[in-house]
Image (cartoon, rainbow, N blue to C red):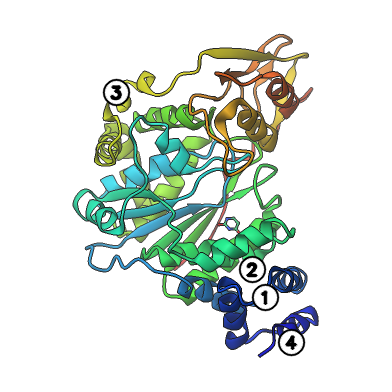
Amino acid sequence: MQITDIIRKKKNGGVLSAEEITFFVDGYTKGEIPDYQASALLMAIWFAGMNKEETSLLTMSYVHSGETIDLSDIPGIKVDKHSTGGVGDKVSLIVLPVVASLGIPVAKLSGRGLGHTGGTVDKLESIPGFCTEMDLDRFKNQVRTHGVAIAGQTGHLTPADKKIYALRDVTETVDSIPLIAASIMSKKLAAGSDAIVLDVKTGEGAFMKSLEESRALAQTMVDIGRHLGKRTVAVLTEMNEPLGREIGNANEVKEAISILRGEKIPGLYEVVVEISAYMAWLGGAAPTQETARPLVEKVLQEGSALKTLKRLIADQGGDANVVEDPDRLPQAANHREVCSDRAGFVQQIIATDIGYAAMHLGAGRQTKEDRLDYAAGIHLNHRVGDRVEKGDVLCTLWYNDADPQESEQLAKAAFVLGDEPAKEKGSILEVVGALS
Ligand code: URA
């Protein structure tokens, strides 16, 4: 088999066979196919797309490129969750203790942030002492005994995706629905859970800008999950403004604790309940998603999910007292208020710009090697729909060593004001795959 024949076939809109897909994935992962030929094939896929069968085959080739985790010896239906990434997305920090409190085992591998989006691992590591590196035996043991563990992604799982993702990143081939779907779903499948809930962020601050694109990605991922025997539901959620009031690592942990203490922060609360209720239903805690909702609300209001978070932090070496006293989390020495130049209604808060503003303060990485300042971040004093007067504080920047100038400009421009009240959109846009 020749890689040039495979490139030509896809370039001409052909359908690749299982052997051709495996030949490409294995050959590239082993270094037998050079970057320039892999790039050409990825670009051909970007233009010609892949059908359902090809996308599932690509996903499985990624899965088979490395180790997989076997969770079958842990009793119960294990449910995983994945977000396609946004700004202020601290949903995992909340829903994982929520569903674990309902008796559903959760074994979660999470990533780090890059560019304008954050990562769950970085947020958790802002808790003094919290460790996200652990071997598989310890990870599984913690899930078995305490119901939840969260670890950083290991290079042993889906190495093909890791290598191909890095190439896509520099060849403008990230934003292809079959390539994104195979990349995300391979990691979920390799991680071994029985069911998967996907939070597909939609809007300016997300990969998928329009509802149509989001729907197509969601359907593709649900089809892959189903095809490979995993119950999969995708919830399309709004990302035209950051989620919640806090952006940054320690700030987001604090906000997660507030929700787990029963606070109903607009936007964030609805997403947390929706995602948790789907996980609870798939995990067998309730016969339907609707009947799972009151169970979720109860563990939030009564504090049992907060206790689960506390135990999770202690299990992973962190300072569990942050749960009662969030001021033990890293605190920034300086702050600057960003004020409005005019009166009006907030129409939009451009999530990407807020994400970059937070990154320049030290909350995110420009390159993989950058060190984070866990205390840096942004507090949004207003949300879309609010009325503000000239001189009102729109948001507050928190930082230590950074120069806040660029962040201030970005954050101010991120607030789009108009004369009319903004239309209320709701945080949950659609659900794909919930009917079976
Ligand atoms: N996240 C992933 O893991 N892979 C993609 O291709 C895009 C987002």
Q: Name the amino acid type tagged 2.
A: Pro
Q: Say which label, 4 or 3, has the lower sequence index.
A: 4
- Picture quadrant where residue 23 is located: bottom right
Q: Secondary structure at mark 3?
A: loop
Q: Badge 1 local density, few (<14 within 10 Å), some, or many (20+)?
A: many
- Using the numbered discs, state the Cα–Cα distance from disc 2 to disc 4 in whole angstroms: 21 Å
Q: Nearer the viewer, mark 1 or mark 4?
A: 4
Tag count: 4
At label 1, the amino acid type is Met
Category of crowding for the residue at label 4, using alpha-carbon neighbours closer than 10 angstroms: few (below 14), some (14–19), many (at least 20): few
Mark positioned earlier in the residue sequence (3 or 1): 1
Q: Considering only vertical position in the picture, is 111 above or below 50?
A: above
Residue 51, percent across and down? 65, 77
Q: What is the spatial separation of the Cα atoms under label 1 and label 2, in whole angstroms?
A: 6 Å
Which image quadrant: the C terminus? bottom left
| Mark 2 element type | helix
Q: Of the numbered discs in the image, which one, if any, rests on residue 5? A: 4
Q: Earlier in the sequence, mark 1 or mark 2?
A: 1
Specify which label sits upstream in the sequence, 2 or 4: 4
The amino acid beneath tag 3 is: Glu
In the depicted structure, whether residue 97 falls above or below residue 417: below
Cα distance in 3D space between marks 4 and 3: 62 Å
Q: Is residue 188 left or right of residue 378?
A: left
Residue nearest the observer in this picture, 46 or 362: 362
Q: Which residue is mark 3?
A: 324
Position of 127 with respect to 207 (left or right) is left
Residue 195 drawn above or below residue 371: below
Question: Which mark is drawn over residue 50?
Answer: 1
